[in-house]
Each structure stands twice: as structure tokens, then as C-alpha cells.
Image (spheres, grey):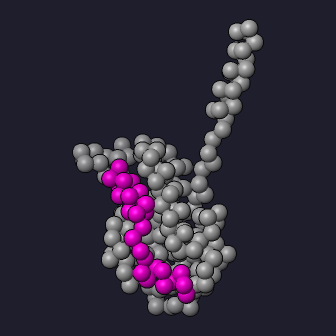
Amino acid sequence: MSRKLLPCLLSLMLAGCAYETPLPSTSQLPPMSMGSNGDQDIAALNLSSWAFASPSRTANDPVNAARAAAAVDYLAGELQRSPRWDGMSVMTKMQMVRARDEVRRTLGVAANAPSQAVVNGLVGAANALSLHDTGAAEQALSSPAFSRPAPQTLAVLNHLPYLQMANVATQHAAAQAYPEDGGCPMC
């Protein structure tokens, strides 16, 4: 009886190993989109952890709010896929995906929207707003990824509420990128 049971158990174990949660959609950040031409991952971590720590930091500052939202969308995929972040806590990576969901709900972004469409829209809006071109910002937020009218999305970016998971995830990710012991996180 045990000889017949062993192949069944092995099949079940292999089937369990084959089941894997798909990785979140990942995007690329356009050059200088996080205000730096250096390391985009670190710039995204720095901006998002600063911006989501308190709503007062982006109040009446839709440029940095849009960039921080784009950073979270980008990081949710990048932290999962890049070997650079293999040492980061799985919990932190999961929190970043939940933060992406929270930010998307707040901005009226479709849950299944490709990350690249979201990042392109938010970075495009931030760039336009930095040039005081509200029309171009609205155009950038008019893609199918955004379900609300662009003026509503801009209003939310102008007064982002406190987003707890975005705060938690970005703080945890930043802390792991800059360990307290001063060691090089990528070495």
C-alpha cells in the first residue's frame, strides 16, 4: 500500500510547488522621473518614503504626490523581480504590492492596469504640472488605466490622504535599503 501511496504524495508535492502567485506587473521609470539621474530604485524609495510619511508633505504639491505614487507602482514590481532586492524581506515586498493597491484605489486606477501605463500617466502628469501645464497633466491622466476624470485625479493628487500601507511599505523598504548598521545593502 505504501508503494502506491508514495507516487500520489510526490505528485501532490510537485503540484504544490508548481503553484505560484504571479509576479505583479512591472514598469520602467523614465530617466529623471524621480528627480535624479542616478539610481532610480533608491530615488523611488527615498521619494516615496518621504512623501507617504505624512499627508502634509505632498499637500498642495501634486508634482511630488504623482511622482511618489508612480514610485510605489514601480517598486511593487521591481522589488519582486530584481535580483538586487533578493535580500529584502518577503513581507516588505508583499506590503509594497498592497501599497500599490491602496494608492491605485485612492487615485481611481484600475487594479489590473499595466504598471507601465500607470507610471507613464503619473510621471507625465508630474512633468506637465512642474511646467504649470494643467491641460497636459490632464491628458497624461486620461489613459484607460485611470477610471476617474483627470481633474478628479489631479484633485486627489493635490490633497493625498494618509495612506497607511503606502507609509508602512515605503518605510520598511527604505529601512532595508539603508541598514542601521551602516553596511552596504547591495554588497
User: Which quadrant: the N terminus?
Assistant: top right
In the image, what residue occupies the spot 52% across and 90% down?
A: 134
**Callout count:** 0
Rendering coords of residue 12 (x, y %): 69, 26
Rendering coords of residue 117 (x, y %): 62, 70
Q: Is residue 36 left or right of residue 31?
A: left
Identify the magenta region: 151-176
Residue 47 seen anywhere in this rendered image of the structure: no
In the depicted view, which residue is nearer to us: 32 or 166?
166
Queried whether the magenta region covers residue 102, the answer comes back as: no
In the image, what residue occupies the spot 38% across and 46% down?
A: 186
Queried whether the magenta region covers residue 152, the answer comes back as: yes
The main secondary structure of the magenta stretch is helix
User: Which quadrant: the C terminus?
Assistant: top left
Vertical relation: 57 (above or below) 45: below
Quadrant of the rendered structure where residue 109 is?
bottom right
Residue at far left of view: 181
